């Protein structure tokens, strides 16, 4: 096919047009949290669909304060100019101690509701994000919580807030989102089994699928595993969190998957380089210093001395020289990939320091999985932690269905770039890792069978008649599907989703 005199693969063009039309209809969410306690670098605001200003801290009378609101009008203007929505996030880890008390009292509850509605108008915001950590359980040590009533009080408050937002600004004109942990809200007997009433009034939840590792655990373990290792480390993961909320009645199309742009250092009590297959070894209960920004902090709720968090931001893994490229460690650091959890980890045999983190490879696998489950998009904690958009750029592939690699090098894509930038940036093309076998007839891989190359893809059929394709994940093929009405097409070493050939 000729486009402006250029020979273009029709499959690539068809995919580009489909993806561009999907972008026009509404791209996948990329939600970024913007903390008010850090100095922000220059950020690629247009690559985010939503930015949450974190955090406004509620007081017992239902008022709340955001430290930095003097600069908010300019920031909101910049976001809107970039086509990005702006929300204020209320709560956070150290700002959730009074939610339970506020929502029990009619006066303070009404005040909080009215203050939220007014704040949105004052600062020209697009909505509000409630980050209560956590209804029905303690969270930070000095949080007030009530397992018998918190969750019901929260639901009632959100229902009234939705009604007030709709009556003030128009039906669903303003967004209402929640930051949530890896299990549904707690009742008196633990996580409740039905959250469907919440989903009717909330636009989406941001799954905090991170901070799963830490000194509160007895061993080294991953910060944000795609799958957990049965019987080893905390039994929570990206997949278990999605399943837990979906099983409780929350639609996956109203979920954003939390992606950490950071990791944690832990002090191992043995040399992990002697057995790289073992990601789980005993640790010190005190975290070592993390990156250059990690300073001792004394949590007023926890009591005790100031301690390091052990946090390593992605940008400092890169600019402090631990990683010379996204997947290359600098000696004495050793990088290991864990196939069970689909995460990388670093180890320094001179100091016995272990670092769990996410990189472009692990994030690509997470968003491929999230796309296969029909999630609305992703959420980032937090925006300033990236390095030259290396992680943020991977998230952009979710807009085309979550299947694009971070770097596209196929000849089909190269030709397609000559059409227009607007179209080709939306092309969904998956570059395959060379494999020992390829689909040559009507049948491709079998779900559950062993696959040869982690992170590789293959169409179920090579003749462009089947919507199914397969992702090689933790050593086995996982079955996925192209969007409604489209099929998977194979072209050399790449696959793409598009309309079937006539």
Image (cartoon, rainbow, N blue to C red):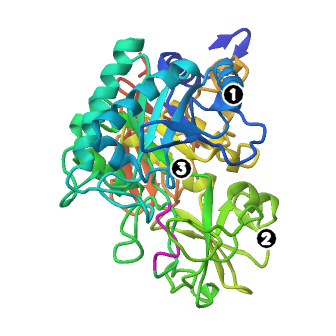
- Please say if 318 is above or below 495: below
Give yes or no for residue 215 being in the magenta stretch: yes
Q: In this view, does 383 lie to the left or right of 119?
A: right
Provide the secondary structure element on which disc 2 rests.
loop
Which of pointers 2 and 3 lies earlier in the amino acid sequence?
Answer: 3
Q: Is residue 159 left or right of residue 295?
A: left
Circle number at residue 330: 2
Circle number at residue 259: 3
Which of pointers 1 and 2 lies earlier in the amino acid sequence?
Answer: 1
Give yes or no for residue 456 being in the magenta stretch: no
Q: Position of residue 327 (x, y in %)?
A: 69, 61
Q: Nearer the viewer, residue 98 or 204?
A: 98
The answer to whether any part of residue 440 appears in the image is: no
Region in magenta: 211-217
Q: Position of residue 134 (x, y in %)?
A: 37, 53
Q: Distance between the residues labelled 2 and 3?
A: 24 Å
Count residues near mark 1 (Cα–Cα under 10 Å), then give few for <14, some for 14-19, many for 20+: some
Q: Nearer the viewer, mark 2 or mark 3?
A: 3
Q: In this view, does 391 lie to the left or right of 196?
A: right
Q: In which quarter of the image is residue 174?
A: top left
Q: Position of residue 7 (x, y in %)?
A: 69, 18
Q: Answer yes or no: do the residues labelled 1 and 2 have beta carbons within 8 Å?
A: no
Which secondary structure class fits the magenta region best? loop
For the C terminus, give its image quadrant: top left
The residue tagged 1 is 75
Q: Which of 36 and 452 is in front in this view?
A: 36
Provide the secondary structure element on which disc 3 rests.
strand
Which of pointers 1 and 3 lies earlier in the amino acid sequence?
Answer: 1
């Amino acid at each position: 096919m000729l486009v402006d005199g250029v020979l273009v693969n029709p499959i690539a063009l068809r995919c580009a047009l489909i993806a561009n039309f999907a972008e026009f209809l509404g791209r996948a969410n990329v939600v970024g949290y913007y903390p008010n306690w850090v100095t922000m670098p220059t950020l690629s605001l247009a690559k985010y669909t939503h930015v949450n200003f974190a955090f406004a801290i509620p007081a017992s009378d239902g008022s709340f304060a955001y430290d930095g609101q003097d600069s908010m009008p300019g920031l909101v203007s910049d976001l809107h100019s970039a086509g990005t929505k702006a929300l204020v996030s209320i709560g956070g880890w150290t700002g959730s101690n009074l939610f339970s008390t506020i929502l029990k009292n009619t006066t303070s509850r009404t005040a909080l509701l009215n203050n939220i509605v007014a704040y949105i108008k004052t600062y020209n915001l697009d909505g509000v994000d409630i980050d209560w950590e956590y209804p029905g359980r303690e969270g930070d040590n000095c949080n007030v919580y009530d397992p018998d009533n918190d969750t019901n009080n929260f639901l009632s408050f959100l229902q009234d807030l939705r009604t007030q937002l709709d009556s003030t600004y128009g039906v669903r004109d303003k967004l209402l989102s929640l930051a949530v942990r890896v299990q549904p809200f707690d009742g008196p007997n633990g996580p409740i089994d039905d959250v469907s009433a919440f989903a009717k009034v909330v636009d989406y939840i941001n799954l905090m699928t991170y901070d799963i590792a830490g000194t509160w655990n007895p061993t080294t373990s991953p910060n944000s595993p795609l799958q957990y290792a049965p019987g080893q480390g905390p039994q929570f993961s990206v997949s278990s969190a999605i399943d837990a909320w979906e099983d409780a009645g929350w639609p996956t199309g109203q979920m954003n998957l939390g992606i950490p742009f950071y990791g944690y250092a832990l002090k191992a009590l043995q040399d992990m380089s002697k057995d790289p297959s073992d990601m789980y070894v005993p640790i010190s209960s005190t975290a070592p210093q993390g990156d250059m920004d990690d300073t001792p902090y004394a949590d007023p709720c926890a009591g005790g001395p100031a301690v390091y968090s052990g946090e390593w931001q992605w940008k400092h893994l890169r600019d402090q020289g631990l990683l010379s490229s996204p997947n290359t460690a600098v000696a004495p650091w050793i990088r290991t990939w864990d196939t069970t959890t689909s995460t990388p980890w670093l180890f320094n045999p001179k100091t016995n320091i272990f670092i769990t983190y996410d990189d472009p490879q692990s994030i690509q696998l997470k968003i491929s999985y999230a796309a296969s489950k029909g999630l609305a998009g992703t959420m980032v904690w937090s925006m300033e932690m990236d390095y030259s958009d290396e992680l943020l750029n991977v998230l952009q592939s979710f807009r085309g269905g979550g299947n694009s690699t971070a770097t596209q090098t196929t000849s089909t894509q190269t030709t397609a770039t000559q059409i227009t930038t607007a179209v080709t940036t939306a092309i969904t093309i998956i570059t395959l890792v060379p494999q020992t076998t390829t689909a040559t007839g009507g049948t491709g891989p079998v779900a559950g069978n062993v696959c040869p190359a982690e992170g590789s893809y293959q169409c179920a059929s090579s003749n462009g008649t089947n919507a199914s394709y397969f992702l090689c994940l933790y050593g086995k093929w996982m079955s996925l599907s192209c969007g409604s009405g489209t099929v998977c097409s194979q072209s050399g070493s790449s696959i793409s989703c598009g309309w079937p050939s006539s």
